[in-house]
Amino acid sequence: AYKGPSLDECLEIRKANLFPGLVTFYKKPVLIHQGHKQWLFDHTGKRYLDFFAGIVTVSLGHAHEATTKALKDQADVLWHTTSIYPHPQIHQYAKELTDRMPGNLKVCMFFSSGTEANDLAVYLSRIHTGAYDVISLRNGYHGAGGTPWGLTATSVYRHVTPTGFGIHHAMNPDVFRGPWGGQSCRDSPSQAQRSCRCAPGECAASDKYADQLKDLMMHSTPKRIAGFFAEPIQGVGGTVQMPKGFLKKAADLVRERGGLVITDEVQTGFGRTGTHFWGFESHGIIPDIVTMAKGMGNGYPLAALVTTPEIASSLSKAVHFTTFGGSPLACAVGRSVLKAMDAEKTQDNCHKVGTYLLEQLMGLQREFPTWIGDVRGKGLMVGVEMVNGQGSIEKGSGRTCSIEPIPPQIMADIWEHTKDMGLLLGKGGVHGNVFRIKPPMCVTKQDVDFAISVFREAIKMSLPRL
Ligand code: PMP
């Protein structure tokens, strides 16, 4: 049984001794005590189905047996030594990780967070190309520290201090909110994906967004750029998928100007999208640099940057090093995660259960067509964008929904009710109106059925009586 401080005591300490910017979820937050597979337990023993996995991080499941054993076994022998001394784990892991990469992406550097990996990616792109300008997409998230703070382009993470000198933000190819439609052109495992703003078969959106990128480079950068960052599916931004073809077009434009293409796989990597191990693979490109974190350690702080030997060699003129990156403990965990992903066929499960989840959510959308504006995603990386169902039918347009966000109070009520009924969902998007669903990859169809019934009830309980 739980013997620690009460929820109220923790909240008091939080108020007094932790940064106020460190927000809590929910009006009445949950004090999490234990985890097992796809479940979390609070201090009273109440069970929650975890559909957010610590922001996509607990990839295999909480307290996963094999990864816990790998961690303990390594901890008994050696916790830490500098990676300057060769120890076996970092070498074995570097080989096993880069074996999963296509092309010439064979060289890696380990870190403890995604922010650090993206920080090096910016630096490396500049050193390698001799150019300075870097582009990321609006609504993207690449970290809240160092240079990546400037790559991150959402007001939720902005203060008055300028960040990211030399970084430009291109128009986000958001096919739900953007002006050119294109919802039917995004990569969906379900043919049932319907759209409320896009004419069927419209595919021109990716060209229009690529034109915007071109325009930005023409006006705001010199003739050469250092790099271009994209998440294959935006995570924090609210599971935003670009129209098919955009990333390929963007990569061509960037490379024409000497820039490197960097995909941030912090959320999309390790099989999460179901059809592929890496998010970029669905877009038909091989990036020059790939960054990853979160799910690679199943919750243990572990991150990496992978690139080609040629690009990596640009950094060999000086020492480059971090204290914790590539520690024996981290690499032992990372290796066991890869092994378990194979043994448990987690990518397959993401595809099967994720597609089922999407279809069930689309069914729910048909029940609440004016409130659920968009259901999107791939594998177990799913988003449900809530819109204002009151008076949102655009007269004469034939469209069933608008993009005006659901009133925050109704969103908060739905979220609170799902938690009270034992389901933890994520939330995101610049308007805070997107439910983000990214469970541990071991979830089942039964879990989806439970989640859908809770979600349905929570919506019914929260919508105004019309
Ligand atoms: N990139 C993406 C896509 C992310 O989602 C995050 C974290 N939410 C980061 C980078 C930063 O990773 P970290 O918090 O480990 O620094």
Image (cartoon, rainbow, N blue to C red):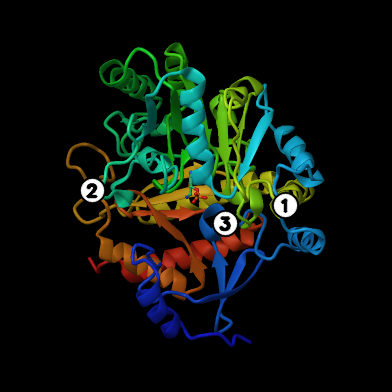
N-terminal-most mark, 3 or 1: 1
Q: How many marks?
A: 3
For mark 2, does the 10 Å Cα neighbourhood hold few (<14), some (14 to 19), or many (20 or more) residues? Answer: few
Amino acid carrying label 3: it is Pro
Question: Disc 3 to disc 1, how far (Cα)?
Answer: 33 Å
* Residue 365 place in picture, x, y as percent: 40, 52
Is 252 on the left or on the right of 335, as rendered?
A: left
Instruction: Say which residue label 2 marks.
Output: 160
| Quarter of the rendering occupied by the C terminus | bottom left
Instruction: Say which residue label 3 marks.
Output: 439
Toward which corner of the image does residue 180 lie, by quadrant?
A: top left
| Quarter of the rendering occupied by the N terminus | bottom right
Which element is circle 2 on? loop
* Residue 177 place in picture, x, y as percent: 30, 39
Which element is circle 3 on? loop
Q: Residue furthest front?
A: 318
N-terminal-most mark, 2 or 3: 2
Q: Nearer the viewer, residue 455 or 246?
A: 246
Amino acid carrying label 1: it is Thr
Amino acid carrying label 2: it is Val
Q: Nearer the viewer, residue 451 or 365?
A: 451
Front tag of 2 and 1: 1
Instruction: Say which residue label 1 marks.
Output: 81
- Is the CB of the residue bearing disc 3 within 8 angstroms of ligand 1? no
Residue contact at pointers 2 and 1, CB within 8 angstroms: no
Which element is circle 1 on? loop
Q: Is residue 267 visible?
A: no
Residue at image coords 70%, 44%: 83
* Relative to 170, residue 366 above or below: below
- Res 164 label: none
Residue at image coords 75%, 47%: 335
For mark 3, does the 10 Å Cα neighbourhood hold few (<14), some (14 to 19), or many (20 or more) residues? Answer: many
